[in-house]
Image (tube, rainbow, N blue to C red):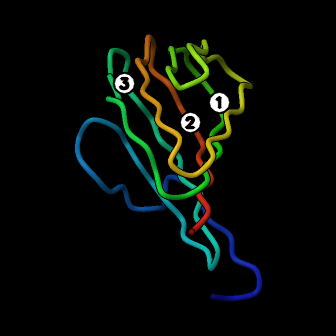
Amino acid sequence: MAETAHFHWDEVAPYGDATADRRGIAGAAGDVKRVRVPAGTVAGRHAHEFEQFFMVLEGTGMLRCADGEIALRPGMVVHFAPNAWHSAVFQTDTVLVEVNFRP
């Protein structure tokens, strides 16, 4: 990878299933993803082996985790330690940016 790279989300190929528009850019130590989630989407309880941050750019939802329920809204940043379980229900069309660190 070059020392400096630039991207535009609309030019990054989507991946995954049809439940959300996921686009990711990989780096050496982790990745950044933009996820567009339609209203009504449910993300069942799961965990990741890696540390993760996500920021809500648009939309609303309800996150559940070991610490309880957290109302998601624009500007909110959430951090998950490795293996922290969570689930979510997205009440409106939502746009998230995730940063994931490789274990």
Q: Position of residue 81 (x, y in %)?
A: 63, 47
Looking at the image, residue 83 sits to the left or right of residue 73; the answer is left
Badge number at residue 38: 3
Amino acid bearing label 1: Leu
Q: Secondary structure at mark 2?
A: strand
| Residue drawn where x is 23% and y is 46% of the image | 17
Amino acid bearing label 3: Pro
Identify whether 93 is placed above or below 21.
above
> Which residue is identified by label 2?
96
Alpha-carbon span between mark 2 and mark 3:
11 Å
Which mark is first along the chain, 1 or 3?
3
Whether label 2 touches label 1, CB < 8 Å: yes
Badge number at residue 57: 1
Looking at the image, residue 51 sits to the left or right of residue 19; the answer is right
- Classify residue 88 by image quadrant: top left
Which mark is first along the chain, 1 or 2?
1
Neighbours of disc 3 within 10 Å: few (<14), some (14-19), many (20+): some
